[in-house]
Image: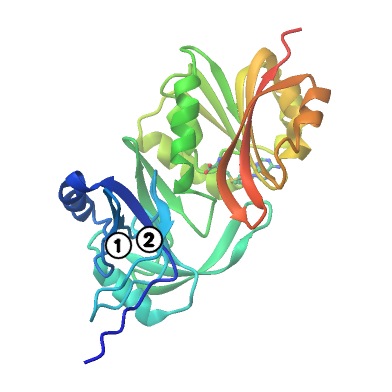
Amino acid sequence: MIHVVRKTAGQWGMRVPAQRGEEMRQALIHEGALDASLKVLREDEDLILPLLEECEGAEWFEFEVHPGREPLPRHELVGGIAIMQDDDPDGAERLLASRPSLRTVVFAQGEVHGEYRIREFRVLAGDPTTRTKVTEHGHIFTVDLAGAYFSARLSTERQRILAQIQEGEVVLDMFAGVGPFAIILAKRASLVVASDLNPRAIGLMLENIAQNRTKNVLPMLADARRLDRILSWKFDRIVMNLPLSGTEFLTEAFRLCRPGGTIHFYSLVSVEGEHTARIRELGGTVLAERVVRSYSPGQWHAVYDIAVSAE
Ligand code: SAM
């Protein structure tokens, strides 16, 4: 009998030391994160455990498919919703059956677009909804994928910025969406002003403020272009998460930040240092420029941590 070895085109995997392999495999099964259709890889003293979704520390590997098991289609998980890039109703049904926490499988029709940075979806399997709840570091966020932007991939960034906040800071989130940065940063800040142009994002942010019992986030339905005219305050820290066109708002952010304050500016870039000259021109110093994630070949999302001149 011929044994045909089938390989995946690529899948997220978690590298663990072989002696901790079984313990980690059980933990991933418990979290519903292990892709049981793929074989565990061995590399020297390490095991690579196949994952159903990207998570912190995950890398991309080629896995062998278990004979007799169909590999699950590629997808991104947001709470109880799996987002597939392919219009594959059979794959969607298999995906839905693969983990009890999944309620809906959708097909993303096209790219994130428009001012509100949203996408259209078609439900392929499960409950006919694009609303779900996402848990992140002890917080719960209600999101509606078709109504307002949300990315679970920014959770590490939110914790990184939270760790930099000094007690009592007043923070502005210029492109706040449903409020994940604002609500998480409010744990340390004395006040977070959270502004967005999309009314549905502000509606969901109000739900999120209530369900996380947050008492120091001020939601604002406003165009970030006008914020420096509406608000006379100077902020200790500003988050600018609008990677495709955030550069258009840098002048406003510098006007709103106090001398010596910090701006976290997210941008889509294709060379390191792409915005350094502009930031210097405005009176800022780049403290760090980090890659957040890759976007397309030769382009990535970067975050610039900027110190605004103290004079
Ligand atoms: N920070 C949020 C998060 O991490 O989930 C959302 C980021 S999303 C990439 C950008 C957000 O900016 C969207 O919610 C969009 O509605 C909002 N936006 C776009 N243009 C804007 C503007 N001129 N003023 C205020 N908000 C704007």
Where in the figure is residue 267, as x and y percent of width and height? 67, 41
Instruction: Pick out the residue farthest to the bottom.
Output: 1
Element type at mark 2: strand
Quadrant containing the N terminus is bottom left
Residue shown at 33% from the left, 60% from the top: 52
Where in the figure is residue 36, as x and y percent of width and height? 24, 66
User: Tag on residue 48?
Assistant: none
Residue 82 lies in what quarter of the image? bottom left
Q: How crowded is mark 1: few (under 14 residues within 10 Å), some or many (20 or more)?
A: some
Element type at mark 1: loop
* Ligand 1 within 8 Å, label 2 CB: no
Q: Which of marks 2 and 1 is nearer the N terminus?
A: 2
Image height check: is 204 above or below 264?
A: below
Q: How crowded is mark 2: few (under 14 residues within 10 Å), some or many (20 or more)?
A: many
Instruction: Pick out the residue farthest to the front.
Output: 44
Write down the residue under mark 2.
81
Quadrant containing the C terminus is top right
Left or right placement of residue 56 versus residue 302 in this view: left
Q: Can residue 183 be seen in this view?
A: no
Where in the figure is residue 29, as x and y percent of width and height? 20, 55
Instruction: Pick out the residue farthest to the top.
Output: 311
Image height check: is 235 above or below 153?
A: above
Q: Judge by depth and name the residue closer to the eye, 27 or 99.
A: 27
User: Tag on residue 102?
Assistant: 1
The Cα–Cα distance between marks 2 and 1, rounded to whole angstroms, is 6 Å
Q: Judge by depth and name the residue closer to the eye, 45 or 280.
A: 45
Left or right placement of residue 115 versus residue 214 in this view: right
Q: Give yes or no for contact between labels 2 and 1 (Cβ–Cβ under 8 Å).
A: yes
Residue shown at 77% from the left, 27% from the top: 279
Q: Is residue 11 visible?
A: yes
Amino acid type for the residue under numbered disc 1: Leu
Residue shown at 30% from the left, 84% from the top: 4
